[in-house]
Image (cartoon, rainbow, N blue to C red):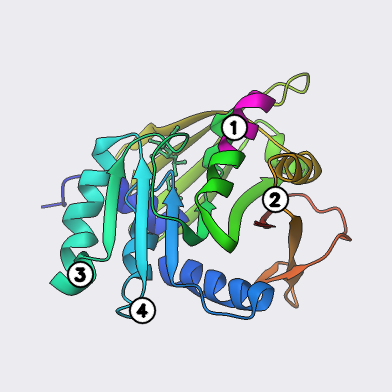
Amino acid sequence: MAQPFNKYVYYEKSVQNPSNEVEFFNEKYEELRGAKAKTLREDFCGTAAISCEWVKQSAEHKAWGIDLDPEPIDYGMNNHYAQLDDEAKSRMKYIEGNVLNSGTPTVDICFAFNFSYFIFKKRDELLTYFKAAREALNDGGVFFMDLFGGPDSIQENTDIISHEGFKYFWECQMFNPMTNDCRFAIHFKRKGEQKRKDVFVYNWRMWGMMELRDLLLEAGFSKTIGYWEGEDDDGGGDGDFFATDEAEQCEAWVTYIAALK
Ligand SMILES: C[S@@+](CC[C@H](N)C(=O)[O-])C[C@H]1O[C@@H](n2cnc3c(N)ncnc32)[C@H](O)[C@@H]1O
């Protein structure tokens, strides 16, 4: 008998790698600040798999995850938080709330991943969010965000990635070049089963690297850094991100911005 379908299982297998994410934060924070980060706030945390991974590092590591939706929080609590020992559990907290106004103790790192802040379509809304993220940081804290782009990424078509036992589909369903309003959707197909369509749907505004960096400065951050991914021998990404303002155009890319308080 096939396991019942749970969308968070397939979402996480397709788009997240918490130990890589933790390694990225450790490496980049130390490069930028010459110290080790201990506290983390995961905005738009969903299941907060990354926060749960973060607190495994030492008894000094603490994390807060914030999401509006109780459903992924529930999944995260039953599947990630539940696997922590009691001491580590005391250092990780889920907050069902809005990233715009959920107070947390200040942290070394705040981050917004999987493009979740694209939900803010108005410049003022995004500015308000960046101010809230900055307020959440210790002096010397760093805010990280990811972003994607490239001409291929805004074509109305579907990327398909095969995983063991299932396929993941990332579809650009609509892109309005006048406003950068866009709709993306995730579908899954388990082996031997019908395709499950529109399992996750995102109505976003696609923001660009420099408009984000300008807005981060306007929100009060002292400096921003744009990263770009190195290339492997076949011309694909090598998973190594370095600070630069120069990059060659490519069909589709995913990268990061760091903003220093
Ligand atoms: C694209 S998912 C990303 C989940 C997770 N961060 C990840 O990387 O996979 C966006 C998440 O943001 C949450 N969300 C949207 N608006 C929010 C807000 N204003 N405050 C907190 N969470 C929000 C949604 O409930 C959803 O779980």
Q: Main secondary structure of the magenta part?
A: helix
Whole-angstrom CA distance, mark 3 to mark 4, is: 11 Å
Mark closer to the chain start, 1 or 2 = 1
Q: Label 2: few (<14), some or many (≥20) within 10 Å?
A: many
Question: What residue is shown with label 3?
Answer: 84
* Label 3 close to label 4 by CB (< 8 Å): no
| Rendered position, 91 above or below 170 | below
Magenta range is 121-129
Mark closer to the chain start, 3 or 4 = 4
* Label 1 close to label 4 by CB (< 8 Å): no
Tell me, yes or no, whether the highlighted magenta stretch contains residue 122: yes
Question: What residue is shown with label 1?
Answer: 128
Whole-angstrom CA distance, mark 1 to mark 2, is: 13 Å
Give the mark toward the camera: 3 or 1: 1
Mark closer to the chain start, 3 or 1 = 3
The numbered dot on residue 57 is 4
- Residue at the location (39% across, 61% down)? 50
Can you give x and y, in whole percent of width and height, for residue 48 in the image? 34, 54
Which residue type carries mark 1? Answer: Thr
- Residue at the location (52% across, 50% down)? 113
Q: Which of the two residues, 64 or 83, is positioned nearer the viewer here?
A: 64
> In the shown orientation, is residue 124 left or right of residue 73?
right
Whole-angstrom CA distance, mark 1 to mark 4, is: 32 Å
Can you give x and y, in whole percent of width and height, for residue 217 in the image? 75, 45
The numbered dot on residue 221 is 2
Q: Secondary structure at mark 2?
A: loop
Q: Secondary structure at mark 3?
A: loop
Can you give x and y, in whole percent of width and height, for residue 42 in the image? 43, 53
